[in-house]
């Protein structure tokens, strides 16, 4: 299992369009991928799960993946979360 704690730097947080792009990217990997905010942990391949976390800019989240491509998944998805655009 690979995990990484990140600060969301997206201007609008991980909402709507950015959440959809995040989920689309997560679905490219075969690993089980999860996003955690506080005590809530959701499947990162679920748009409803991601949206339910209501992740805004500056929020700290933990991204974790378990599978044969876990490191690539965490690296790629971290890039989306830490992007300042």
Image (spheres, rainbow, N blue to C red):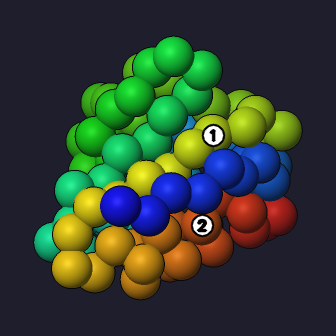
Is 23 above or below relative to 62?
below
Q: Are marks 1 and 2 in contact (CB under 8 Å)?
A: no
The residue carrying pointer 1 sits among few (fewer than 14), some (14 to 19) or many (20 or more) residues within 10 Å by Cα, namely some
Mark on residue 78? 2
SS at badge 2: helix
For the N terminus, give its image quadrant.
bottom left
Residue placed under numbered mark 1 in the picture:
61
Q: Residue at x 27, y 61 (%)?
A: 66
Q: Residue at x 48, y 69 (%)?
A: 74
**Marker count (numbered):** 2
- Towards the viewer: 67 or 78: 67
Seen from this angle, which residue lies furthest left?
30
- Is residue 28 found left or right of 13 in the rendered image? left
Is 2 above or below relative to 75?
above
Mark on residue 71? none
* Quarter-of-image position of residue 69: bottom left
Q: Does residue 12 show up?
A: no
Estimate the spatial distance between the alpha carbons at disc 1 and disc 2, rounded to whole Å: 10 Å
The residue carrying pointer 2 sits among few (fewer than 14), some (14 to 19) or many (20 or more) residues within 10 Å by Cα, namely some
- Is residue 4 found left or right of 19 in the rendered image? right
Q: Percent from the top left, x then y, of residue 75?
A: 53, 77
* Quarter-of-image position of residue 61: top right
């Amino acid at each position: 299992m690979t995990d990484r704690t990140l600060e969301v730097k997206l201007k609008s947080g991980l909402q709507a369009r950015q959440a959809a792009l995040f989920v689309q990217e997560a679905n490219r990997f075969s690993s089980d991928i999860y996003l955690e905010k506080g005590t809530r942990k959701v499947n990162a391949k679920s748009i409803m799960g991601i949206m339910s976390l209501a992740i805004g800019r500056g929020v700290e989240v933990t991204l974790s993946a378990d599978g044969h491509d876990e490191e690539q998944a965490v690296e790629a998805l971290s890039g989306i979360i830490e992007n300042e655009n």
